[in-house]
Image (cartoon, rainbow, N blue to C red):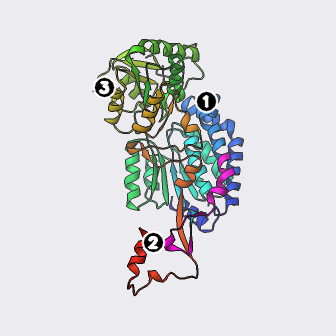
Amino acid sequence: MRETVEALRNGFKKGKMQSVEARQKNLLKLKHALLSYEHELYNALYEDLGKSEFESFETEFGILMMEINEAVKHCKAWSRCKRVGTPLMLMPSSSMIQPEPLGVVLVMSPWNYPLQLSIAPLVASMSAGNCTLIKPSSYSPSVSAVLKKMINENFDFEIVRVIEGGREVNEAVLKERFDHIFFTGSVHVGKVVMRAAAETLTPLTLELGGKSPCIVAADADLKMAAKRIIWGKAMNCGQTCVAPDTLFVHESVKDQLIEAMKQSIHEFYPQGCLASPIYGKIVNQKHFDRLCGYLKEGRILTGGHIDREAHKIELTLIDGLSENDELLKEEIFGPILPVLTYQDIEEVFDYVRAHEKPLAAYLFTNDRDLQKHFRKDLSFGGGCINTTLLHLSNSKLGFGGVGSSGMGQYHGYRGFCELSHFKSILKKSRLEAPVQYPPYGNKLKLMKFFMK
């Protein structure tokens, strides 16, 4: 482990990613490597998560192509020294901010989007000029193996490496010194990573999770809302950190919305979720058993059937829950959606505020005042109005959590910023400003004139 990290540090010291040209060259090499391994990666995603080729492209491969294109196009401009204003008191001088790379970055990625969440942070790291070590999750072994082969065969080992392994490897890698740690995963493991980072005062990005609320107002287009909520919940069989986790619907339209959601499920999977070749599976037995336990809570409105051998669970809507039910306390991370009703929107806002800040939130309404209220007065990492999930696919929007759902942002320019240091520099001319030097005499009055 230490030799791998030292090799990357040597690569950084040699300036192998320092120039913009080197960054663009390696980003393009990454794009070509992904294209060369495209179908091998699709097969691996199917083996680990049952993802169809369309879903794999839509949620992983295609997003990475856009991220790389954005970084190649703009990293030169992002890396430029930028002039900023200088107060009169400091004249004559000029002020500037110079972005610089941090050094060696550790990326610890999860199993649910094992390709996108390994490579998107790498794109940010490369665009900023860092060298990178990637540690994928052992829960997605097929994708991890392809990633290791793709990266380690195509790149200088002093620029980027992939290592595999389970908990022991995670513990070993966290004992090494990095210049930044980028972790995506659960809140529990995020705390472990943060404690390890504290030992060396290593800055870190945490992309965690939470219970993302989805709110449907009485005036919403119910058919559209149903389709977009089911689409967002079904993606990757609900194993998405920004999936709708609790549905809040105005009591006057609950029955209509539920019927529309049942219809959407049938339209998406006419042969049924369990038989559909485009409906994913739960990653392993442990998570499958956990989700099956949730099916015993409340009242099932639709779904609830399982295929234990295939690790598949139907899209399931459940109501009749109490505040003590696990479905309302834990992040679900599966194709089960609790349904709660409300009379006044403030009930929902108060409920959300009473819990940890979520990674995402969604609102369906045509009321512009309510949309503004949602944007301004409810705290969450990011979200959508009148759709779900799509905010994270726009590289112009930063993606990240707030509070216990995470810290830091990435995608596009925000990723470059996250993995750069912005160095402040003031350049003084040869002309002197005598007021700053002792003896001070009556200079205080002049100083106050310029600084007040």
Please tell me whether mark 3 sits on a helix, a strand or a loop: loop
Rendered residue at 45%/81% (across/down): 435
Q: Nearer the viewer, residue 2 or 266?
A: 266
Left or right relative to 146: residue 406 = left
Residue behind mark 2: 450
Q: Position of residue 1 (x, y in %)?
A: 51, 58
Q: Position of residue 317 (x, y in %)?
A: 43, 18
Closer to the eye: label 1 or 2:
2
Determine which of the numbered discs, if any, sits on residue 123 in the image.
none
| Range drawn in magenta | 69-94
CB-based contact (under 8 Å), mark 3 and mark 1: no
What's the residue type where badge 1 is placed? Glu
Please tell me whether mark 2 sits on a helix, a strand or a loop: helix
Q: In the image, is residue 323 part of the stretch drawn in magenta?
A: no
Determine which of the numbered discs, if any, sits on residue 325 in the image.
3
Q: In the image, is residue 87 part of the stretch drawn in magenta?
A: yes
Q: Position of residue 39 (x, y in %)?
A: 68, 35
Determine which of the numbered discs, if any, sits on residue 55 in the image.
1
First along the sequence among labels 3 and 1: 1
Rendered residue at 49%/57% (across/down): 180
126, above or below 91, in the image? above
338, above or below 96, in the image? above
